[in-house]
Each structure stands twice: as structure tokens, then as C-alpha cells.
Amino acid sequence: MINEELTPEQTSDTPVKDASVDIAVKETTVEETPEVETQEDGTTTESIEVESSTNGTSDINYLDPKLFSDIRTVSKQEMDEAEINEDVTEELKGKYENSLAEISENQVIKGRVIGMNDHVILIDIGFKSEGIIDREEFTDDTLPRIGDQIDIYLERLEDRRGNMVLSKEKADFMRRWQDLKEIFDNQTTFTCKIIRRIKGGMVVDLEGIQGFLPGSQIDVRPIKDFDTLLDSEIEVRIVKLNEARKNIVVSHKVILEESLKEQRDALLSEMEIGTVLEGRVKNITDFGVFIDLGGVDGLLHITDLSWGRVNHPSDVVDIDDSLTVKIIDFDQEKQRVSLGLKQLTPHPWEDVEINYPVHSTVKGKIVSMTNYGAFVELEPGVEGLIHVSEMSWTRHIRNPNELYKLGDEVEAMVLSIDTGDRKISLGIKQLQPDPWNEIEEKYVIGSTHKGVVNNLTQFGAFVELETGIDGLVHVSDLSWTKVIRHPKEILEKEQEVEVKVLEISRDNRRIALGFKQVTEDPWPEINKHYETGKEVSGSIIRVLDKGIILQLDMDVEGIIPFGKKPKKQRKEVAAKLKQGDTVSGNVMEVKPDDKKIILFSEVYSEGGVKATKDSVKEFLDEQDSPASEKIEMPEELQQEIAEESTDAEE
């Protein structure tokens, strides 16, 4: 069912005008001079215009001004004095009533033209009064003559002025409507003209009546430019006729579909999977392309357009493109056909090992990116993965968008091919020499270099020696004399420092650096300076539960243990001492590994030397264990490497 309808405003360009015209009798003097003829008896008469009707009889134009030229004018006084007989016989009354036709409003009737002037035409329909029609309803070619019989539409017997309202246009409309109704009932095909464009379709001329041709009913395929159809003839069939609203909807598509049905049935009966056909792109959607195969529409899914990636079908085809396609599946009962375009060419993976041998250099475009790498299209249907670990020899790449973006053209080396899973591993860094191959010659162990601190962690500081080459200064290698719990106590980011190469592992791509090793080890001199039993003094740094920490000469720390002093007395001592106070003690032992000078004080230590040493041992055991100077991977970095390995395997 077609729902499109014309509104009453769309039914006709020219509204039917009210044909009623006031006819008033006025006392005017006729300016025309009638023709005068002289009779044999000497009298004169005026001639009246007479027209010959089509049936050979003479008819008078009752609207001719000369018609009343021989009528005597009677004054009101003469009428008052005259004797009037108002009696009418029954016989005469019956003859008059029988002369009147039985007519009613809103119907098409016949009438005879009995008069006309420049504005109206007078029509006799056999009623007690004549009707009038606006002369503009007739063209010069259709203008009737006096006495002609014509079809007219009776709108009203009397308007508010007492005039009978007739219409020739409405009579023509009703007659044509009846003809169109018969055409609709018989489903007859006919030709009409497209006259203008409106929202949703076109308006057609049905010989005086306007019909609506919806845009969806013009053709079996979408129309690009409706304006090209204006003023053209088109074959249609009426598909909807609304009697109440006088609305007609026509269709050209139903005619085409009937002619295509035979082609469709013949094509489906001969169709087989694997058949190659020619078709035309009829419509494009997000999921595929509809192809007109000549009466049957087939779906070319987006995944069957190309062996490669297709973001949208419009990237591959356009409307009205001619395509050669292959039938990959069809359902004759449901008339559904699945088509393929890529199936006409061999799968590109059949020769991938020949076209892209391992260690060869290839070029491609980045078509997809994930957090673990970038996919590069080498040709439609063949893609390779560049893992983040294969992008740079020196930089730690966490995401490929740090270096590339979608659509970038890149050059890479083929690292491996897995034809079973259809995977190709690519690498970019392999196109450049590995700087770590010569790292041991460039950074000899024991050599001193300058670098910039680019990262601080709990376990040390990373120093960039050159672009992409970093070394680690462990917290244990930051100071000879102090226990450093975090590198930020000594260093800060972007600080330029001088470091010494302690160890290099080319296989693990790691360099161990030392910050304190740039200067001489002060502990031999400290040992000489702090002889056992020597009394020294220093300022209090802090007071702990186990003892007092002092800042001594030569930038070294000393500790006076409380020994076996009860907790209550420790608190009392701590309450009396404050940071910066000077305290003295005797050197008991020098411990370079623990970076401490052990002192004994009779005032603050209790329990003798042995108790003091036990207290010192307990205190030092609770300190952070000094880290080994060997190159060992911190757990944090080990976790990062493990995650990268997992991503690579995926």
C-alpha cells in the first residue's frame, strides 16, 4: 500500500472560481444606436442581433443590450392607475410547472447557452431561472456559441444574491474523475506529463486533474536528480484513488517491477553457486552493497569486497558502478543472493613467502594500532605487526602512537612469517645498526662520562649518556659516607652529573653507573682519623629508640647506642636532647660497609662495651641492607619486561 497522497492544495494549480455574478436591473440609457428599417407602410423598426445555433435554428442572445430597445417604458404612475388581473388559471399554472426540470445541487447537468457578454455566459438549464458561468472558465478554443448544449456542474441553486451558480471547470473535473476511476478499477496503464516537483515526489497532469507520483515510485533504483524528469512524459498506473479527498497516487515502478519479474524468475532458475555475473551498484549501506543483477538484487557484504581492510563500502565502489561479481550463496525461495568480489582473485597469502621473504625490506601503510604494536598493510589482505619492542633499539616504547599515527607509510624488515596463522612479524629498528653492538668499546668499564638524570626511582637514578642509552646509578652508589634511602636526597631530574661506568651487559642492554666512584673512597682516611678509643664530638642529627645519631667530621655519621638503658630512661634522655646539640663519645669501631662510626658514652650508653656492641649490631641489622654493586634487575623493571613479553606472545 502506498501512503503518499496529495493535499487538496496540490490537486489543482487553478482554483475553481465562484461563477456567480450579480445581475442588477438599472435604469440606464442604452448608448448603442439600433439599426432602423423602413417598412412598406412607412413605419420604422429596430433590428435585434440574432445568431444561428448549431442545430440550424436562430437563437437570441439574451444578454444583448439591443434586446430591450423596443420595450416601452412604463412609469410608476401608469402602473398604479392600471388594472392588474392576478388570477392565473390552473391550466396555465400546470403548463408552467411542467416546463421546469427536476434538478438538484452538486451534479453534472446539460444546459443551453442563451446569452454571453465579456464577463459571463448565460445558461438555460430548464429551471425557473437561468444560471451564469464566468467566461474565464473557457478558452478561446472551447468558447461555446449561442444555442450550444454543454455539460455544466450545478454548485448552488441560489447564492446569497439569488443567482444560480454553475461551473464548467467542475463539470470537466467530474467527468475526468469518472474516467480516471474506471482506469483505476481496470488497472489500465496510461501516459501522463510530469509538471512540477514537490516534497516527496512529483506532480503529474492527468488531463485536468493533478496526481502525485512519489519519488519511491518513479523507478526501481534511486533517482539522483528529479529535476531532469520535469516536462517529460511517463507511463504510469493509478495505485491509489481517494474518492473523499479527490486524491490520486500513480506509480511507474509497478510497471517496471512487472517486467522485471519474468527476468527475475528466469535468472533464479538458472542461478548456481560460483556463477560470475555482471551487475550494477544499486545502493550502498554501512554493511555492504546491493547489486542489481537484472531483476534480482544481491548483497555484496563489506567483508567480501576485498581481501584487505575496508572501512566503508563507499571507499571501494560508487552508485551505478558496473561490477563483475561471483555468486557465493543464494536462497531461491527467499530470493536472497550473496555475492563476492574478492573471490574473483586468488588469496594473497598463497604466495606471501615468495613475495615477502624473511629479512627482506618491505613498505606499507599503518592501518591499525594497539597498545602493543602497529599493523601495517603490505597489500590488500596481507598485514604485518610491528611490536613496540621492535620499533627502537634505544627507546622504551610503551605505545606505538609515540612514534606513528594511522595512515603513515613505513619501511620495515620481515622478521618471521607464520602461514598457518597468517601472521607476519615486522621490525623497524632492524633497518638501523644496533648501537649496543659497540657499547663496550664506547663506554669502557672504569671510564668517566657526563650525563643527564632523566628518571628517579626508589632503587636508583637513570642517567642518559646519549640519546637512547641510559645507565642506572643504584642508591648504594650515590654516596660513600651516607645511607641514601631515595636518590632525590642527592639528585634531581634534568641535573647534569658525572658518573663512572661500573659494569656493562650487552646481552641484557644494561649499564651500571656509579656516582660516588667519581671521587676517591674516603674510608681509608676515615679509618686513620677515627682511631679506636679516640674521643670525638658531633652535633645531633636525630635521637632514635636505639641511640643517638651524630654528624661527625669528614661528612660521616656516628652512633652512640643506648645499650641496656631502660625505655623510660631513653625517653628521658631523648626529652633532654634536641637536634643540633653537641655530644661527645669514644670511638669503638669504624664500619665502612655500614657507613657508620660506633661511639661509646658513659653518660648515654649503659651495660658496658659488650651491651653497647650488641645494641649497635641490632640497630645496623634494622637498617636497609646495602645493595650489591652487581648489575641486578630491580623487581619493578622485571615486571615491565614480563608484561611486554606477554603482549608480544598475544
Image (cartoon, helix red, strand yellow):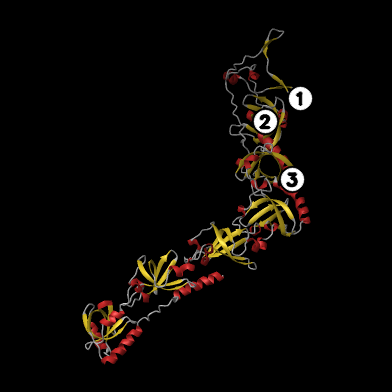
Which mark is on residue 128?
2
Relative image position of residue 124 (x, y in whole percent): 69, 29
**Which image quarter: residue 167?**
top right
Q: Residues within 10 Å of mark 1 (few under 14, many from 20)?
A: few
Q: Which quarter of the rendering shows the C terminus?
A: bottom right
Pick whichever of labels 2 and 1 is earlier in the sequence. 1
- The residue lying toward the viewer, choosing from 225 and 323, is 323
Q: Position of residue 624 (x, y in %)?
A: 36, 80
At a point 75% along the width and 24% down the height, the residue shown is 54
Q: Are marks 2 and 1 in contact (CB under 8 Å)?
A: no
> Can residue 548 be seen in this snapshot?
no
Q: In this view of the protein, which residue sits in the foreground, 101 or 217?
A: 217
Q: Nearer the viewer, residue 279 or 60?
A: 279
Spatial separation of the CA atoms under disc 2 and disc 1: 24 Å
Question: Tag count in the figure?
Answer: 3
Pointer 3: what residue?
Answer: 185
Task: Report the disc number at residue 55.
Answer: 1
271 to the left or right of 483: right
Seen in the picture, residue 4 relative to 510 is either above or below; the reply is above
Tag on residue 417? Answer: none
Secondary structure of the residue carrying tag 2 is: loop
Q: Position of residue 441 (x, y in %)?
A: 45, 69
Mark 1 or mark 3, which has the lower sequence index? 1
Q: Which circle, 1 or 3, is nearer the viewer?
A: 3
Identity, as a three-letter code, of the amino acid under mark 2:
Lys
Of the two numbered discs 2 and 1 in the rendering, the one whose residue sits closer to the viewer? 1
Q: Looking at the image, tell me whether mark 3 or mark 2 is earlier in sequence order.
A: 2
Label 3 secondary element: helix
Q: Is residue 4 left or right of residue 484?
A: right
Q: CA distance from mark 1 to mark 3?
A: 38 Å
